Image: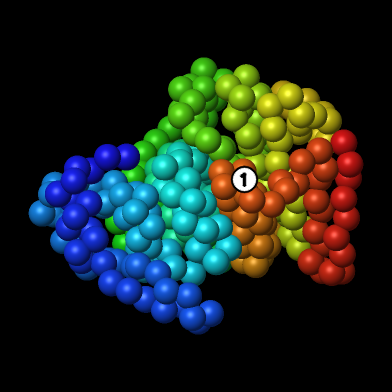
Amino acid sequence: MATGQSTDNLIRRLSKSWTAPDKKKMRVIDLRNVRFISSKKRIPPREIEISCLEQNIIPIRYIRNIGTIGIEGQLKLLCSTVAVCGVGGLGGTIIELLARQGIGHLVIIDNDKFAENNLNRQIMATEGDLKKSKVKVAVTRIKKINSAVTVTAVNKKIDSKNVKNLIKDAAVVIDGLDNLMTRQIVADACNKLKIPFVHGAIAGFNGQLMTIFPGDKGLSAICGPCTDENACGIEAQTGNPAATPAVIAAWEVQEAIKIITGIGNPIRNRLIFLDFADGTFDEIFL
């Protein structure tokens, strides 16, 4: 993404040398100078950070990512769009981690408001945010975490008519939903749009996840069809202790990072099932 020669020169001038713990030297730039260049040149911070990485200059906020995904991987993340369906127990943590990791554009979709029974597990929920729109609260939170992230907030319920338009620009779509029918609607749309879909679900001390690429056997191979629009997930009966969605959400984020960067092997054609009460891990191969 071109920012202009004068901007690139300013980036290089304001960067500095930094020595990593392994004694390797690299060029870095701090948040204050990224903001300064963005303001001076009237260029969004995301574009400034992209230009930095293209010159092998690492924004310090991402320095702990580089050993795992490299400069090229971080650049891919900043240039990517990820859609998160749901801003609840799973979705809120997913959004938080994606923003910290440096996904450049987040599309977040939910039409719900925070309620008191969300406070035990939904990382975006606070006592001061009760009855507020989940997506609006999430936008504020994201900007506090990473001002370089572009956010598209969609305060709508997902259905078969709007889903394709909502997720069409995403490189990956992540499941933060709470019912099977909407999950199947999103998964079907991803298949038609040729977008990978990272599925996760929770119930009590249990969680499951898998990544579904276009053409793969999907949720219907595990759950069968669902035609009840009002059906709730089993977590409505089993409860949702705080740690369960946190673990599954973190794993879903790792799947998205692997897909975008091309590093590692996604959990494909198999369902991972975790029982935290017994400390067991099972796989179902499709």
101 in relation to 284, above or below: below
Q: Residue 127 placed where, x, y %?
A: 40, 66
Which residue is more in the foreground, 19 or 139?
19
Q: Which residue is drawn at 75% across and 51% down?
A: 208
Looking at the image, residue 22 sits to the left or right of residue 237; the answer is: left
Looking at the image, residue 44 sits to the left or right of residue 49; the answer is: left
Which amino acid lies under the numbered mark 1 shown in the image of this protein?
Gly
Q: Residue 271 placed where, x, y %?
A: 81, 45
Q: Which residue is drawn at 84% across and 69% down?
A: 279
Q: Residue 23 placed where, x, y %?
A: 49, 81
Q: What element carries label 1?
A: loop
Residue located farthest toward the left when viewing the structure as drawn: 40
Number of marks in the rendered image: 1
Q: For the N terminus, give its image quadrant.
A: top left
Provide the residue designation for mark 1: 262
Q: For the C terminus, give its image quadrant.
A: top right
Q: Which residue is drawn at 76% across and 33% down?
A: 219
Looking at the image, residue 53 sits to the left or right of residue 118; the answer is: left
Q: Residue at x 18, y 46 (%)?
A: 5
Please indicate, yes or no, whether residue 49 appears anywhere in the rendered image.
no
Please indicate, yes or no, whether residue 54 appears anywhere in the rendered image.
yes
Give the image quarter of residue 282. Answer: bottom right
Q: How crowded is mark 1: few (under 14 residues within 10 Å), some or many (20 or more)?
A: few
Which residue is more in the foreground, 281 or 158?
281
19 in relation to 8, above or below: below
